[in-house]
């Protein structure tokens, strides 16, 4: 079975790609979904986040207040590094456990924070990069997701550039156009890997 990483920054369309792959019947593991799971109340990462950021990081129901945490970490690089230290190891363990459960010709792992070491950790045979121009990504964040423009710009500024991402991936999927064009490019890559 092939394990293919799907990397991409916020607003690039990585989730659109993985949702399409899931509809086509491929196994998809999304690091963002796993990240929400590992910080559920009373799990080790939840306790570590509460200890690191104080009770202010908790919503009234005891869950991590993701909006509050995002506001803190996307404007403070040291806080972002602290968040990543707390959660990344546990996210990796969970992704590996889910990969063991996938059957079929390929599993796709959505990794918004892809790093070269992820190839070995997750036994990736290929990495696809979903990319959008900064202007398109910003428009999606403000328009479709309803983020404040200042917040959207701060989130984009904390991510690698397209050039940095291109240096790390095997195949680029540019997503400045329509969904139909995006799906066509994904289909081309599936055919090229003998997975369609």
Image (cartoon, helix red, strand yellow):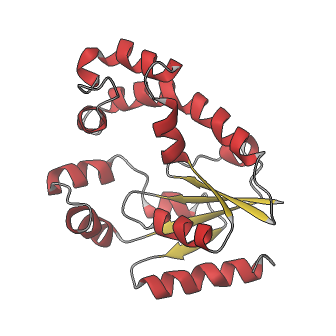
Question: Can you say whether 154 is above or below 185 in the image?
Answer: above
Relative to 92, 76 lies left or right: left
Tell me which corner region of the image, top left, top right, bottom left or bottom right, holds residue 132: bottom left
Question: Can you say whether 136 is above or below 142 in the image?
Answer: below
Q: Quadrant of the N terminus?
A: bottom right
Between 78 and 196, the one lying in front of the other is 196
Question: Can you say whether 42 is above or below 157 in the image?
Answer: above
Between 11 and 131, the one lying in front of the other is 11
Given the current orientation, which residue lies at the most extreme right position? Answer: 1
Q: Count the marks.
A: 0
Residue depicted at x 49% and y 87%: 181
Q: Position of residue 111 (x, y in %)?
A: 56, 51
Q: Position of residue 89 (x, y in %)?
A: 60, 29
Q: Position of residue 174 (x, y in %)?
A: 48, 76
Residue depicted at x 51% and y 67%: 130
Q: Position of residue 46 (x, y in %)?
A: 44, 22
Relative to 62, 130 lies left or right: right
Res 117 visible: no
Relative to 161, 140 lies left or right: left
Residue depicted at x 47% and y 63%: 15
Res 108 visible: yes
């Amino acid at each position: 079975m092939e394990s293919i990483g799907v990397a991409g920054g916020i607003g690039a369309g990585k989730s659109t790609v993985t949702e399409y792959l899931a509809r086509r019947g491929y196994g998809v593991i999304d690091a963002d979904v796993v990240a929400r799971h590992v910080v559920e109340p009373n799990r080790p990462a939840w306790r570590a986040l509460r200890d690191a950021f104080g009770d202010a990081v908790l919503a009234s129901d005891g869950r991590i207040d993701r909006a509050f945490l995002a506001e803190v970490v996307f404007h403070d690089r040291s806080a972002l590094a602290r968040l990543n230290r707390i959660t990344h190891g546990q996210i990796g363990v969970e992704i590996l456990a889910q990969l063991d459960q996938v059957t079929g010709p390929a599993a796709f792992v959505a990794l918004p924070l892809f790093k070269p070491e992820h190839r070995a950790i997750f036994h990736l045979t290929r990495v696809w990069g979903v990319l959008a121009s900064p202007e398109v990504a910003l428009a999606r964040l403000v328009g479709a997701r309803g983020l404040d423009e200042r917040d959207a710009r701060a989130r984009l500024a904390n991510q690698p550039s397209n050039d940095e991402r291109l240096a790390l991936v095997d195949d680029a999927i540019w997503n400045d156009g329509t969904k139909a064009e995006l799906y066509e490019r994904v289909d081309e890559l599936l055919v090229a890997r003998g997975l369609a």
